[in-house]
Image: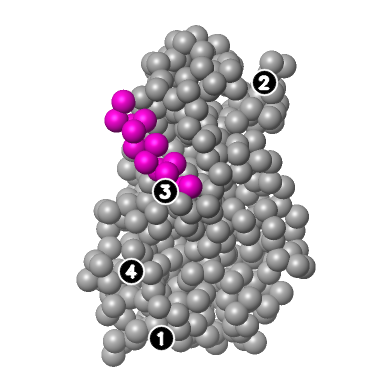
Amino acid sequence: MRPEDARYVIIGAGFAGAATACHLAFQGARRVVILEQEAVPGFHSSGRNAGFIRQVLSEPSVGDLAARSAEFIRNPPPGWPVPVSYNAIGSLIVGRGQQWEAVCRDAELARERGLDVECWSPEKTVAAMPLIEGGVLDGAVWCASDGVIDIAALLSGYLKTAQSGGAVIRYGATVTEVRAGEGRVHGVATDQGFVEADVVVNAAGPWAGPVGVMAGAVPIAFHPRRRHLFVTPPLDWVKPDWPFVLNVSDEVYFQPSSGGLMLCPCDEDEVAPGDPPTRPEALELLAERLAAAYPDFPDVPIGRYWAGLRTFTDDNRFVIGWDPGIEGFFWVAGLGGHGVTTSAAVGSLAARVLFGADEDPNFSPARFG
């Protein structure tokens, strides 16, 4: 296959594009080219998250994807090229007042999907996680099958599977034009040359909006939001089997990581697509939210921190499906903070729709047109 003549061109080698390419390979697709502007995949969003698989979610359609994805990651298909560790530490989603009531409703939806979840009393919650003693909470939702994965291994597995099916990945390829005319796409121009294609898959993450504009597709507003993660040095009192703890009332979470803790203030200020600079104020926000949530939380040193992007639509729902106005232009974008959690099922859904299955109306781009 010559990369300049493709059936499918996928823009972006993060979790959305890589998982779609992987599942296209499972479907037997050939002549696939993946264009990635960076020298490595997952540089901006997919490689900068906490790697946590969370299945108790408020949007039922996203919860379904999360549960199916978690099952895929725990039990990958035969011949999966890269082992992906899945540390099932479980999750505790804690809260109070209206937020706690909403989490309880989410838990009921999760049970209906077949997940084994429990609602715990404050006393049982503190017994399982002593760091939150002194915090004011009405309870916690416990999901034992949630866990932490090796995000680099998962992303590599998607891409290697795609390559085993014949896909070509072109790194350092910046898209300069999505060529379209007479109501359909014709290919993608990059600084490395033009790739003729029948189908262009927009999995460009924070750049999905500008790529859509290039094609003349339905106008969809995307909002890249910066989020900081902080990691302590190893701490001898941290237990590696402690669960992930998300406080939905005070908007802060933490989990064991590399012998210490990973912590996040759940910040989400909107920024332009790109490599987001870190903000010293984010550390102050983390301290404020930890103190508000858990007055007795110990002082911990910060060893390193970084910022990544989470990209949302106006209605906070994914965009997966054919563009209603440009034939051959396909969207896999707006996954927000659920890219790693839902990636396997998102890729499977996208590949099925690309091969003729019906779209999920919850995610259809037509809702914007």
The secondary structure type at the circle numbered 4 is loop
The C terminus, quarter of image: bottom left
CA distance separating discs 1 and 3: 43 Å
Q: CA distance from mark 1 to mark 2?
A: 55 Å
Q: Are marks 1 and 2 in contact (CB under 8 Å)?
A: no
Residue 99 drawn at (x, y percent): 33, 32
Between discs 4 and 3, the one toward the N terminus: 3
Q: Residue at x 61, y 70 (%)?
A: 22
The quarter of the displayed image where residue 38 is located: bottom right
* Disc number placed over residue 186 in the picture, else none: 1
Label 1 secondary element: strand
Mark 4 and mark 1 in contact (Cβ < 8 Å)?
A: no
- What is the three-letter code of the residue carrying label 2? Val
What amino acid is labelled 3 in the image? Leu
Residue name at image x 63 percent, y 76 percent: 26
Residue name at image x 64 percent, y 65 percent: 159
On whether residue 110 falls in the magenta region, the answer is yes
Stretch of the chain drawn in magenta: 97-111
Q: Inspect the image, locate mark 4, and give the three-letter code of the amino acid beneath it.
A: Pro
